[in-house]
Amino acid sequence: MPVYNKLVRDHVPSAIAANGKSFRTRRLSEAEYAQALKTKLREEADEYARARDDLEALEELADMLEVIRALSAVHGAGWERLESIRFRKAEARGGFEERLFLLDVDDSK
């Protein structure tokens, strides 16, 4: 019997049951949930890095967005507030559209 010990999407247990398999789950505490989401975000980022094509990359990015939405709620904010923070930072510091790669900074002055 495979052991997973990981956070899964809400409909995964019903999909497992639909395949005639049995499973066990437990509801995480708030602290466990926050930690599991952080672990899940790293997992999804790793899967994105290993994506073989654009479609697979987009699928993994969508998974990351779902985890980020959940993490935003854990931190007491909705998607709108998170987007507002993102927008404010982009206005102040810019985005990544110009593809700038900082080589070094002379800090001798």
Image (cartoon, rainbow, N blue to C red):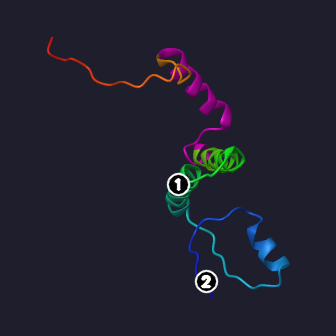
Looking at the image, residue 84 sits to the left or right of residue 31; the answer is right
Q: Which residues are magenta?
A: 72-92
Q: Residues within 10 Å of mark 2 (few under 14, many from 20)?
A: few
Residue at disc 2, secondary structure: loop
Report the predominant secondary structure element of the magenta stretch.
Answer: helix
Tell me if residue 25 comes above or below residue 80 in the rendering. Answer: below
Looking at the image, residue 23 sits to the left or right of residue 71; the answer is right
Residue type beneath disc 2: Pro
- Residue closer to the observer: 31 or 107: 107
Q: Is residue 89 magenta?
A: yes
Image location of residue 94, percent across then percent down: 51, 18
Q: Can you identify the residue that label 2 sits on?
A: 2
Q: Can you identify the residue that label 1 sits on?
A: 46
Q: Which mark is residue 38?
A: none
Quarter of the C terminus within the rendering: top left
- Residue closer to the observer: 29 or 86: 86
Q: Residue at x 36, y 24 (%)?
A: 102
Q: Is residue 29 magenta?
A: no
Q: Are marks 1 and 2 in contact (CB under 8 Å)?
A: no
Residue that protrudes farthest toward the bottom in the picture:
1
Q: What distance separates the C-alpha of mark 1 from that of mark 2? A: 22 Å
Residue at disc 1, secondary structure: helix
Quarter of the N terminus within the rendering: bottom right
Quarter of the image where one finds residue 18? bottom right
Q: Residue at x 73, y 63 (%)?
A: 10
